[in-house]
Image: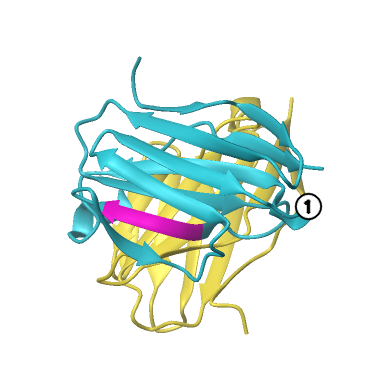
Chain colours: A cyan, B yellow
Amino acid sequence: ETGVTQTPRHLVMGMTNKKSLKCEQHLGHNAMYWYKQSAKKPLELMFVYNFKEQTENNSVPSRFSPECPNSSHLFLHLHTLQPEDSALYLCASSQDSTSGRGYEQYFGPGTRLTVT
Amino acid sequence: QKEVEQDPGPLSVPEGAIVSLNCTYSNSAFQYFMWYRQYSRKGPELLMYTYSSGNKEDGRFTAQVDKSSKYISLFIRDSQPSDSATYLCAMRGNNNDMRFGAGTRLTVKP
């Protein structure tokens, strides 16, 4: 595997379910990100991890819970979601998040989430 | 006012045309300016970046930044059908926070 991988690619869940999204990067990077992409809206940065430490939480509801066990893996745990949470969830990584190179982010293909 | 404004299009041009894509922004703290390309069912990929004002050229692509006007552009020369994608502008200051435009969907017709 190369680059940034995400599983599953598609997920349909009910509002009472609990599920997790997984992201893995094979680039030796130290920063990882979760973004939400909704139709015709800008990408919304959700969480940033730099060297496994969470450095950003952009007022994301607590029904989204990130976990970063090491610099290569990032999870997004989901519970009691709402229909408006349906979107494409993108994971990205970069060399680190605080230096100028933080702009050079590599994205995974995303998980298309549908909440019914 | 949105922090980053980008016309969503869609934009349709014939093969070989010059394409101009633009974004405006309001935050004068932005220093890094990027263009990402996103093909259908794929994640965005970094196409070009520019630090501060100026021009940058890479093959058929030219990125321009005018900080005084808070305006950035991406030009595609000799456009090809393979350039059909959504183009996202992005920018950030000296912190972690990247801001994206909503993306412009481009179709290049053979």
Residue for badge 1: A83
Residue A29 as seen in the image, left or right of residue A68: left
What amino acid is found at the position of numbered circle 1 in the picture?
A: Pro
Residue at the limit of the structure toward the top, as seen here: A1
Residue A86 part of the magenta segment: no
Relative to residue B78, is residue B25 depicted above or below? below
Q: Chain of mark 1?
A: A
Q: Nearer the viewer, residue B2 or B72?
A: B2
**Residue B94, image x and y in percent?**
25, 71
User: Where residue A71 sits in the image (x, y, percent)?
Assistant: 23, 39
- SS assignment for the magenta stretch, majority: strand
In screen coordinates, is B99 left or right of B12? Answer: left
The quarter of the rendered structure image containing the C terminus of chain A is top right
Q: Is residue A15 left or right of residue A27?
A: right
Q: Secondary structure at mark 1?
A: helix
Which residues are the magenta region? A45-49
Quadrant in which residue A18 is drawn:
top right
Q: Residue at x 53, y 62 (%)?
A: A62
Seen at 60% across and 33% down, the residue is B39
Disc 1 packing (10 Å; few <14; some 14–19; many ≥20): some
Looking at the image, residue A48 sits to the left or right of residue A50; the answer is right
